[in-house]
């Protein structure tokens, strides 16, 4: 996808991008859909592709993200379902919007598209066989940013409540909720690890493992998650059993998230399959996870771990434990300051000089950062560690 975006120079070339997504390329002028008046007259508007009955319109102009959304709103007001591609040829940016459900949009750097943006574009693939409205819903979900975060939080809370209610009544209500939160947080963390390709290099490692377990009539909690949590993720590869090695190339995560909790010993049983099946089907497999900017291109970013913790914990428990998530902008600011200070000390230069050398990706800087060790003494949901992983 990235090479195709780099070759975009005109509205006509957008047809190649859509063709790569499985859409039928088209090239038809659209009278009356001009988005704005430019220096040479009204902006050109074309239909450049079609996913079944769902059309993709293309216009040109500056501020392509806002432009795409403005044209999409105009379509929505007219009762038309479709997508809009707004191309800024001089600024080398592309805006994408959908005339559906709040008119979600995203703006793409054609020469340096972010990984999460590319993942978003890949989710636009499809033939539109289910009809224009069905494809519009798919496209809107792919392009939604903050709205996706809100939907994820609501889905997480619903799943948490359902799982807590389904646990044995011998546990107190607060204990059941804490235990359910621990289980779901572990899986949520693993979805971010999976997005980096670190669960045996497979994009659907977790979903496939759950399907395999259910298909064989096994218990998800006993036969999949317990061996994965306690015999695999929490042990170095050399110390793993034959069963654990059967999961494939799984990292050793030595934080404590995958160590048995006292509440788990109180459970004295498994979380039933229907609860886990609903958690995967209705929560984890409905969303796209990225280790990148929060909310970018419709992805769920790692700061959602902290937002979930702070949002669903009982207020008294949160205050007593000091559980407050760190917003992503603050994570980035602290990490940049820490890396700059580290390099300034190692390279015996000023902070400003260290920043310049980071930007230039000098070999000496690269060598130091390849060997750097980071310590987060109060890791919590791992926002700083996951942020450092992506930054480095």
Image (cartoon, rainbow, N blue to C red):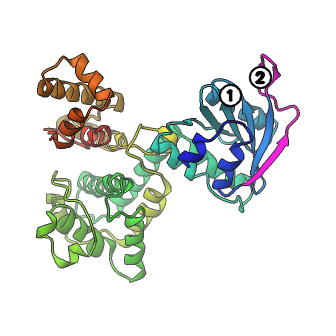
In the rendered image, which quarter contains the C terminus?
A: top left
Tag 1: Cα neighbours inside 10 Å, few (<14), some, or many (≥20)? many
Residue sitting at 71 percent across and 39 percent down?
Answer: 84
- Write down the residue under mark 2: 36
Q: Is residue 31 left or right of residue 157?
A: right
Q: Is residue 267 visible?
A: no
Please tell me in which quadrant of the rendered image residue 23 appears. Answer: bottom right
> Which secondary structure lies at badge 2?
loop
- The region drawn magenta spans 24-43
Residue 38 in magenta?
yes
Circle number at residue 67: 1
Mark sitting earlier along the chain (1/2):
2
Q: Quadrant of residue 48?
A: top right
Q: Where does residue 188 sit, x and y in percent of width and height? A: 34, 53
- Circles 1 and 2, Cβ within 8 Å, touching? The answer is yes
Q: State the residue lying farthest toward the front.
A: 363
Element class at badge 1: helix
Q: Residue at x 48, y 41 (%)?
A: 150
Using the image as rendered, state which of residue 3 and residue 209 is in the foreground: 3
- Cα separation, mark 1 vs mark 2, equals 8 Å
* Residue drawn at 25 percent across, 30 percent down: 335
């Amino acid at each position: 996808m990235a090479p195709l975006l780099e070759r975009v120079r005109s509205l006509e070339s957008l047809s190649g991008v859509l063709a790569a997504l499985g859409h039928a390329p088209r090239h038809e002028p659209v009278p009356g859909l001009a988005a704005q008046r430019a220096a040479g007259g009204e902006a050109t508007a074309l239909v450049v592709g079609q996913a079944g009955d769902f059309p993709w319109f293309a216009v040109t102009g500056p501020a392509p993200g806002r432009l795409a959304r403005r044209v999409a709103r105009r379509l929505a007001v007219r009762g038309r379902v479709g997508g809009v591609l707004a191309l800024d040829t001089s600024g080398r940016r592309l805006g994408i919007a959908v005339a559906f459900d709040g008119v979600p949009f995203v703006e793409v750097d054609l020469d340096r598209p972010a990984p999460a943006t590319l993942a978003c574009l890949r989710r636009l693939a499809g033939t539109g066989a289910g009809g224009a409205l069905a494809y519009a819903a798919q496209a809107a979900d792919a392009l939604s940013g903050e709205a996706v975060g809100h939907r994820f939080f609501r889905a997480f809370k619903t799943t948490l409540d359902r799982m807590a209610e389904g646990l044995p009544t011998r546990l107190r209500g607060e204990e059941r909720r804490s235990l359910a939160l621990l289980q779901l947080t572990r899986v949520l963390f693993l979805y971010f690890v999976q997005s980096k390709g670190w669960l045996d290099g497979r994009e659907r490692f977790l979903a496939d493992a759950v399907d395999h377990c259910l298909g064989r009539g096994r218990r998800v909690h006993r036969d999949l998650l317990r061996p994965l949590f306690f015999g695999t993720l929490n042990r170095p590869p050399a110390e793993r059993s034959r069963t654990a090695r059967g999961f494939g190339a799984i990292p050793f995560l030595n934080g404590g998230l995958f160590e048995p909790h006292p509440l788990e010993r109180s459970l004295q049983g498994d979380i039933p399959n229907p609860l886990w099946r609903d958690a995967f089907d209705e929560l984890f497999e409905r969303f796209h996870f990225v280790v990148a900017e929060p909310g970018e291109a419709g992805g769920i970013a790692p700061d959602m771990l902290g937002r979930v913790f702070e949002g669903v914990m009982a207020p008294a428990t949160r205050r007593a434990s000091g559980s407050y998530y760190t917003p992503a902008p603050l994570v980035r600011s602290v990490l940049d300051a820490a890396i700059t200070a580290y390099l300034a000390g190692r390279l015996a230069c000023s902070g400003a000089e260290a920043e310049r050398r980071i930007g230039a990706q000098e070999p000496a800087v690269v060598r130091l950062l390849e060997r750097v060790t980071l310590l987060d003494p109060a890791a919590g949901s791992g926002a700083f560690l996951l942020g450092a992983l992506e930054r480095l």
